[in-house]
Image (cartoon, helix red, strand yellow):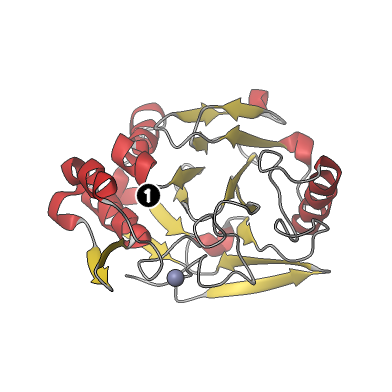
Amino acid sequence: MIASMDWEAVQRGAIVFYRFRDSPWSNISHGFLTRKGGVSAPPFASLNLSHSVGDDPAAVAENMRRAFAAIGLRAEEIVTAWLIHGNEVALVDAHHRGRILEGVDGLITAERGLALFMRFADCIPVLLTDPALPAVGIVHVGWRGLAAGVLEAALEIFERRLGSCPSGLHAALGPGIGGCCYAVGPEVIEALGPRLGRALPLHRINGAWHLDLPEAVRRHLCHLGVPSVITAGVCTACHLEDWYSHRAEHGRTGRFGAWIRNP
Ligand SMILES: [Zn+2]
């Protein structure tokens, strides 16, 4: 696991987010909002940014207002997605500003100044950039998306539609569930086998197989030709004070936000 050399917290009022300061990320507006600084009540406390988990819609709207004000984005300017753990990735531009794309788990843009936003609770937020274009992307990667080829789909757009070479891409992995907390059944191992094979990072804890999902994503990106992959090295389930964890909170929880803006 290659942990970021420079993963820092930023506090703006009551809102706290984290970002990478490693090159080239220090030149790109991006970040991962913690669950701190919002108004939602438990089990969504407090900065839940999802309308689809059963939280009070008024609280979510206020959380969005606070979060976007803190990070300097406006809701009508961003592109976001309704995630389904699939392998659809969309190339978006200025025409998609303010829209929610249904059924996609990856967003990519070469539009200058356009921001992409997604919500997470255990799945890995994968940020991508080709600084030479410039272009950026955000991908929601759980075991289902990894098995279905969502990373391949994202890289194909960078290569075929934007003319990137994988060796020119950089990837950064935000907080997600770690191998310490992610017991998986045989269906997960069987689904990932064809794509990752021996590269699957599994280990036993108290007799149960655990998958190191961030490491699986990192190895697969390297296998696909992306040489520069850094990770926050933060397990969502181990740090419920900062992040939401679908697994550790038994499905009753909120979603934290992650964004990236093309320079
Ligand atoms: Zn953990």
Q: Is residue 185 above or below residue 108?
A: below
> On the rendered structure, is 184 left or right of 79?
left
Element at badge 1? loop
Q: Position of residue 203 (x, y in %)?
A: 23, 68
Asked where in the image residue 145 lies, by quadrant, the reply is: top left
Q: Is residue 33 above or below residue 220?
A: below
Crowd class of label 1 (few under 14; some 14 to 19; many from 20; radius 10 Å): many
> On the rendered structure, is 52 left or right of 207?
right
- Residue drawn at 63 percent across, 69 percent down: 242
- Residue drawn at 66 percent across, 43 percent down: 53
Q: How many marks?
A: 1
Instruction: Name the residue that disc number 1 marks.
Output: 169
Q: Position of residue 63 (x, y in %)?
A: 80, 52
Q: Nearer the viewer, residue 201 or 231?
A: 201
Mark 1 beta carbon near ligand 1 (under 8 Å): no
- Residue drawn at 70 percent across, 58 percent down: 43
Asked where in the image residue 45 lies, by quadrant, the reply is: bottom right
Q: Position of residue 167 (x, y in %)?
A: 29, 50
> On the rendered structure, is 181 left or right of 245?
left
Q: Position of residue 33 (x, y in %)?
A: 66, 60
Q: Residue furthest top?
A: 95
- Residue drawn at 56 percent across, 29 percent down: 92
Q: Is residue 229 above or below residue 3?
A: above
Q: Which quadrant of the figure shows ligand 1?
A: bottom left
Q: Is residue 50 above or below residue 20?
A: above
- Asked whether residue 226 is in view, the answer is no
Look at the image and tell me in which quarter the N terminus lies.
bottom left
Dot 1 amino acid type: Leu
- Asked whether residue 252 is in view, the answer is yes
Q: Nearer the viewer, residue 199 or 113?
A: 199
